[in-house]
Image (cartoon, rainbow, N blue to C red):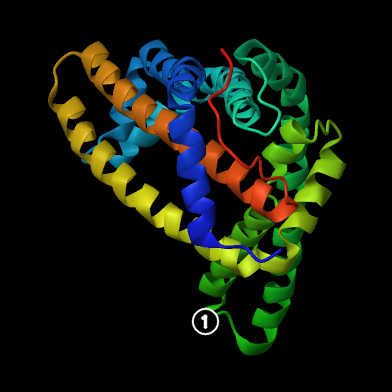
């Protein structure tokens, strides 16, 4: 089936608007609150967002909080995965209750972690092969711009892989697929015929997201740096980052479900609000 950007976006906004209150609650609990917690548990984390910070001091601060931050980060990631999966399930064709969607999200989170590990492994292997090939090429023609070329190629490959695997969440939730290999393969198949249109669609959304995020975090990062209280600065940045993360999660959930319905032919016909 041919991918239609306009139709996908219209369908996504329809799904979101029909279920916005419930999506906002899920996003608030599973996306906003964890973001706020990480800033309050690590108040110095707010200083890392200061664009005027000394690079040497910044590096020392990162090294100091890195170990505990990884532990908290993994726990929060799992919690947020449940939220993402629950939102995808809520606006899918089957229309579960909120409790059923969250329960299925909890059950499917290990699968999502599995797909993330497989994605990282694939990126590592492809990156290794590219670096090896370009290193051999550099021995022949000289280094020159090959370092830049390597970075561009690696980034391009990662973006293409993300494009091809972007429907993994709806496959996991809407097809109740718990095998990470099968979920990735299914997404790969669904995006096969329209990969470049889908790539362009995500790039467009990505540019808008980056502009808004950089502006918001840049402005509030300066505000946070100007506040004398470290806790208050962390609270400000935690709220801003949490709101952005929650809104992005709602939009992404709507977009991937709309794309899945279009490419898998799983349109629900009419859109109705999810049962609470």
Residue under the point 14% across and 17% down: 228
Residue under the point 52% across and 81% down: 144
Query: How far across and down, in percent of the image, does residue 21 sit?
Result: 43, 21
List the residue tagged with mark 1: 144
Image vertical order of residue 55 relative to residue 272, above or below? below
Residue toward you, 174 or 82: 174
Q: Is residue 54 left or right of residue 125?
A: left
Image vertical order of residue 132 relative to residue 251, above or below? below
- Quadrant housing residue 164: bottom right
Q: Quadrant of the C terminus?
A: top right
Residue under the point 16% across and 29% down: 223
Instruction: Inspect this view and state whether residue 166 appears.
Output: no
Residue toward you, 202 or 43: 202
Looking at the rendered structure, the secondary structure element under dot 1 is loop
Q: Is residue 259 left or right of residue 55?
A: right
Residue toward you, 195 or 79: 195
Residue under the point 83% across and 34% down: 177
- Quadrant housing residue 36: top left
Seen as rendered, the residue at the extreme front is 270
């Amino acid at each position: 089936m041919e991918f239609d950007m306009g139709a996908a976006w219209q369908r996504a906004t329809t799904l979101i608007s029909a279920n916005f209150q419930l999506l906002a609650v899920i996003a608030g609990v599973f996306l906003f609150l964890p973001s706020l917690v990480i800033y309050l548990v690590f108040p110095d984390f707010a200083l890392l967002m200061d664009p005027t910070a000394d690079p040497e001091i910044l590096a020392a601060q990162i090294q100091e909080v890195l170990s505990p931050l990884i532990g908290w980060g993994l726990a929060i990631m799992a919690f947020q995965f449940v939220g993402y999966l629950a939102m995808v399930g809520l606006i899918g064709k089957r229309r579960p209750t909120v409790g059923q969607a969250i329960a299925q999200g909890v059950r499917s989170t290990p699968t999502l972690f599995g797909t993330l590990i497989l994605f990282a492994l694939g990126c590592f292997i492809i990156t290794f092969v590219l670096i090896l090939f370009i290193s051999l090429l550099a021995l022949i023609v000289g280094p020159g711009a090959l370092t830049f070329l390597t970075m561009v190629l690696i980034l391009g490959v990662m973006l293409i892989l993300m494009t091809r695997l972007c429907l993994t969440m709806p496959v996991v939730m809407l097809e109740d697929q718990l095998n990470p290999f099968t979920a990735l393969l299914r997404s790969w198949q669904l995006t096969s015929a329209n990969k470049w249109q889908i790539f362009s669609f995500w790039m467009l959304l990505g540019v808008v997201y980056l502009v808004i995020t950089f502006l918001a975090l840049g402005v509030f990062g300066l505000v946070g740096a100007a506040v004398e209280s470290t806790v208050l600065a962390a609270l400000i940045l935690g709220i801003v980052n949490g709101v952005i993360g929650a809104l992005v999660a709602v939009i992404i959930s709507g977009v991937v479900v709309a794309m899945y319905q279009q490419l898998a032919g799983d349109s629900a016909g009419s859109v109705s609000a999810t049962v609470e």
